[in-house]
Image (spheres, rainbow, N blue to C red):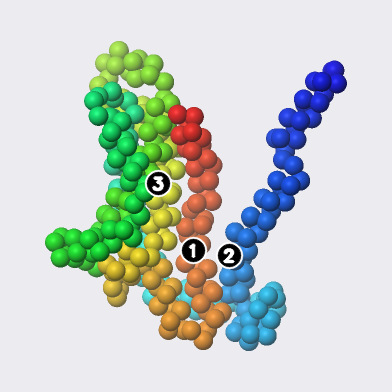
Amino acid sequence: MTAKEEGFTKKKTSLEGGTPLVWAIALVVVALTLGPVLYGVLSGFRTNGQLAENPAALPDPWVLKNYVGVLTNPNFWRYAFNSAAVAVITTTLVVVFGIMAAYPLARYKFKGREAIFLVFVMGLLFPVTVAIIPLFILITKDLHMGNTWWAVALPQAAFALPVTVVILRPFLQALPNELEEAALLDGASRIGFFWRILLPLSKPGMVTVGVLAFVGSWNAYLLPLLLLQDKMKTLPLGVADFSSEHSSDIAGVFAFTSLAMIPALIFFLAMQKQIVNGLQGAVKG
């Protein structure tokens, strides 16, 4: 191997492995991201006296009563059930209508296709907070759906559709046209190609948008705050209520908050590989 080739190999290895500066920055970002989460989880295993004496110390001894108290609280499970129901409905609507909207925009050529896609792109510029008052009036006064799962799930799905279409469209465009041509030659219709071939191949992209929709719905606070009351409240609202009612029980609040975020965190980590594959397919498209 020549000196030039050896230098190129070392440079390539350095880029792939990352420089010490890159690793240091990555470790700082990880620490800033996971530090508060880890602190909250560990603080749930401490007593209020331990937190007051030394807030930054590790549990000594480890106390389980805070987590046991939350898990035996029926309100926690009611909040969790409402959050899960709203998140499942939102995710289903986002995936179903997202793939149905992205398919013609990706595979069909018709006049105004790019203009329609631009409408979805522009939808990324409008957060739900912009339309919160009209949504409240529409849901409660016109549709009479206030204090129901659908009252939150429908707006959440609508505001999640733009990013869903933006991710799925290039992913679907990346699928070879030869597959569709071969399917049509074999007698399959466009609908048949969609159900039998395109949907299975689009699984990584659908999982990606589904996970993003689920986590976003699970963590949503503003819409449930305005549209849900009493027994229909979701976990973020439950955390706020628990914090207000037990403001002196800091360790219990940490335990409640930690248990509230664990399901979404586990779901996101379990689907991490699928999310990466889906985003890679969208970028390649």
CB-based contact (under 8 Å), mark 1 and mark 3: no
Identify the residue under disc 1: 261
Between the residue at mark 2 and the residue at mark 3, the CA separation in whole angstroms equals: 24 Å
Q: In terms of sequence position, does the residue under pointer 2 or pointer 3 come before the other?
A: 2
Between the residue at mark 1 and the residue at mark 3, the CA separation in whole angstroms equals: 18 Å
Q: Is residue 189 above or below residue 236?
A: above
- Residue 121 locus on image (x, y percent): 35, 41
Under mark 3, the amino acid is Gly
Under mark 2, the amino acid is Val
Q: Is residue 53 above or below residue 72?
A: below
Mark 1: secondary structure: helix
Q: In terms of sequence position, does the residue under pointer 1 or pointer 3 come before the other?
A: 3
Identify the residue under disc 3: 210
Q: Quadrant of the C terminus?
A: top left
Mark 3: secondary structure: helix
- Residue 270 locus on image (x, y percent): 52, 49
